[in-house]
Amino acid sequence: MPRVTRIPFFYGWVMVGSALAINAVSSTMNPVVFSFMIGPMSEELGVSKSALAWSFTLRLFAGGLVGPFLGVLLDRHGARWIGAMSGALVATMLIALAFVHSLWLIYLVFAISGLAGLGGPAGQLLTQVPLAKWFVVRRGRAMAIATVGMAGGTMFMIPLTEWLLSNFGWRTTSIVFGLTVAAIVVPVSMILVRRAPEDLGLHPDGSDTLPASAAEHALGRHAHLTTANNWTMRQAVRTRVMWQLLAAQSLSGAVLMGTLVYRVDFFKSLGISPEAVAFGTTLDPLTVVFSAFAFGILSDRVPVRYLGAIGLFGFGLSLLPMIFATASPIAVVVHSVTWGMAAGGNITLNNIIWPNYFGRLHLGAIRGVVLPASIAASGLGPPLFGFLFDAGMEPWQVWSVSLAAFAIAGLAVLVSRPPKWGDRDGANASNSARVEVGSAEPA
């Protein structure tokens, strides 16, 4: 029987705060921060940026490999001990990175850090899956607040990274990042994180009682936004919409990662000062702080596929200042602000569409199964862009291809309607998977 714990507020908001803190610290591993380190690392080690870009790709691939297992473990046991162990592993690898001097060891360190499932698409499982179980009606709002940690952490890390690199070098910077992860992710996960509201004798969204109808609790007047049905992993992968969404996310993920890794060096190559590039790039996560929250609030009222399509189309528009770029810092500012506004829609799409379309009970397993393909595509983005640049392709041509890819992905998301329960598209889903959203899950 689940243990009933009396607290003066809904514990789900503690989970939101925990996810916010973990996301903020995990920003030390995202491609925006890595884009500032790749230049100094390339110069000291004497290797090309495209070769170093493979290290980030290996981290993503490793996250894809562990994703299916991590998703199942999160459904069964939650993110408490998994998050603590992941934080310890990432911290160790970031510190170890400061002491390596060969490319293959950098590859190894990045790959091992990817197994922790932090700082990449797999890392989203550690914060998104638990929150999707704690919230249904307020899911968009809760995930938006947690996502602000990722954007806010990146906004803070950009000037800090530039300052550390300028004064101490990339090796000391990596050590600082590792110590920060160890100091925050490990204790927050161990002390605050819990698997599901039922483990504390609670119900999603802090409901006082379990409604007679799951749809009454989960949907209410927003029945067109989410589902009371809990699709199993096998049922979900038989739906057309899952693969349609996966294709869109894979395509957009590849060009997104490639753009993030190379845009800083691109702007610097135009003759824009490093300080101006750093300032302009900081406007990206600063804008995301507001756009992610706004899109998250809207997702409780507007179908998420519309918001996701807006985000992907916005990414495409943000590339226009790069296609027609001059040496003016204004190009960095316009790109970064537009990109940050679009990112709110894309983040909301990734956070919300899976639980809204397929339910919360088997969410970890479902996300874990589709994760390897999306990570493989995202991981190929940086080396693919590096190959195109090394082969002599003009930057405006690369950014034009990216714009087209974002447009195609946006159209695919726009027409991705929710799967219908029990119809041919759902492969005759069995009624056994239709578990009430408020019902207790195994501890």
Image (cartoon, helix red, strand yellow):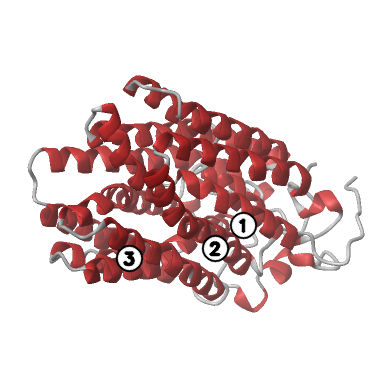
Residue 336 is labelled as 3
Q: Of the numbered discs in the image, which one, if any, rests on residue 148? A: 2
Asked if residue 119 lies left or right of residue 276, the reply is: right
Element carrying mark 2: helix
Residue carrying label 1: 20
- On the picture, is 317 further left or further right than 141? left
Task: Using the image as rendered, state which of residue 220 and residue 269 is in the foreground.
Answer: 269
Within-10-Å neighbours for mark 2: few <14, some 14–19, many 20+: many
- Mark 2 residue type: Val
Counting other residues with Cα less than 10 Å from the Cα at mark 1, is it few (<14), some (14-19), or many (20 or more)?
many
> Do residues under tags 1 and 2 come within 8 Å of each other at their CB atoms?
yes
Q: Can residue 235 be seen in this view?
A: no
The one nearer the camera, 97 or 285, is 97
In percent of the image, x 68 and y 47: which residue is there? 432
Q: What residue type is labelled 1?
A: Leu
Q: Position of residue 183 (x, y in %)?
A: 66, 42
Q: How many labels does the image show?
A: 3
Q: Position of residue 339 (x, y in %)?
A: 34, 65
Determine whether the residue tagged by mark 3 lies in a helix, strand or loop. helix
Tell me the quadrant of the picture where the C terminus can be found: top right
Report the amino acid beneath label 3.
Ser
Percent position of residue 304, x then y = 48, 68
**Dot 3 or dot 2, earlier in sequence:** 2
Task: Give the distance between the C-alpha atoms of the residues marked 1 and 3, in whole angstroms.
Answer: 22 Å
Label 3 neighbour load within 10 Å: few <14, some 14-19, many 20+? many
Is residue 243 positioned above or below 93 on the image?
below
| Residue that appears at 29% across and 69% down | 333
SS label for mark 1:
helix
